[in-house]
Amino acid sequence: MPFIPDHRPPQQPTPLAWHFAFVERQLLLPEDESQTLQPHLAADWQSPATTRHYLGTLQGHDVWTLTLPEVPAGWRRVPLRAAMMQFAAPLLALAGRAAQVLEWDRAHRFCGVCGTPTELQSGERARVCPACGHAAYPRISPAMMALVWRPGELLLARAPHFAPGMYSALAGFVEPGESLEECVQREVAEEVGVRVKNLRYFGSQSWPFPHSLMVAFTAEWDGGEIVPQPEEIEHAAWYPLDALPGIPPRFSIAGHLIRDWVAQMAGEGAR
């Protein structure tokens, strides 16, 4: 059975439930690393939780996200990114959803307009100010990703915070009043100084670090020499399809984007 999202806690909770529990923003996994995350008795997780939100059902079991004051016996805390890399879908997506819901709840306990404590709503996932009526919903920050190509080569870049030797496609956040296509054109020009054309949508991925939605494109090079943006891009260059540097794993959409486009370009021969 697929995941069915819902924000309303059930009148009759399932005896066993999935729990995405966090301590200091790190996800709890079984202490025994040979064990995987599985549904557990719901009653065991209720009393110690300081924050608790219902997410829906997966495989007929309720799904909860919660924060705990300390790590219980038999569990260990793992950085969210490392934990998600161990999951297959849909647990990978659910872990991201769980973290984003908790971050929304943490960041909007007070009204951003007048400072009054906000209140959870029963009819929707929102925190509303009882004084001025301002509503805060889970924040989603759209960001574009662009894999720039020309016949036989890809333009890949690395930011200063990347792991050593890691390169990826270009990426940046959408600005107010900007379309996704305009964002691609602007970000590519800002980050590496080249022009692009023939944008093609590839796919999207929720990225909970902390609340992004990555929207990926391929884009054909349309001129210009690479000029890395100071402080944003440590190095950028054209790489032959058969001599790529280190690239992200398939855990991220960047890993899928680069590998799938290389396979397509190689299958079609010279473009």
Image: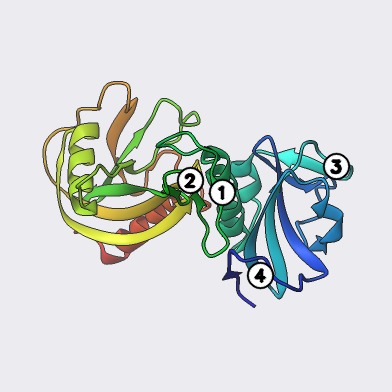
Can residue 155 be seen by looking at this rendering?
Answer: yes
Q: Judge the density around disc 3: few (<14), some (14-19), many (≥20) Cα neighbours within 10 Å.
A: some
x, y percent for residue 183: 22, 46
Q: Are marks 1 and 4 in contact (CB under 8 Å)?
A: no
Q: Amino acid at mark 4?
A: Thr
Depth check, mark 1 against mark 4: the one in front is 1
Q: Tell me what residue is drawn at x 65 percent, y 78 percent.
A: 1
**Residue 268 shown left or right of residue 222 in the figure:** right
Q: Which residue is mark 3?
A: 72
* Marked residue nearer the N-terminal end (1 or 3): 3
Mark pair 2, 3: CA separation = 34 Å
Q: Amino acid at mark 3?
A: Pro
**Residue 261 shown left or right of residue 205 in the figure:** left
Mark pair 4, 2: CA separation = 29 Å
x, y percent for residue 191: 24, 33
Secondary structure beneath dot 4 equals: strand
Judging depth in this view, the residue of 5 and 53 nearest the camera is 53
Q: Which residue is mark 1?
A: 119
Q: Which residue is mark 4?
A: 57
Mark pair 1, 4: CA separation = 24 Å
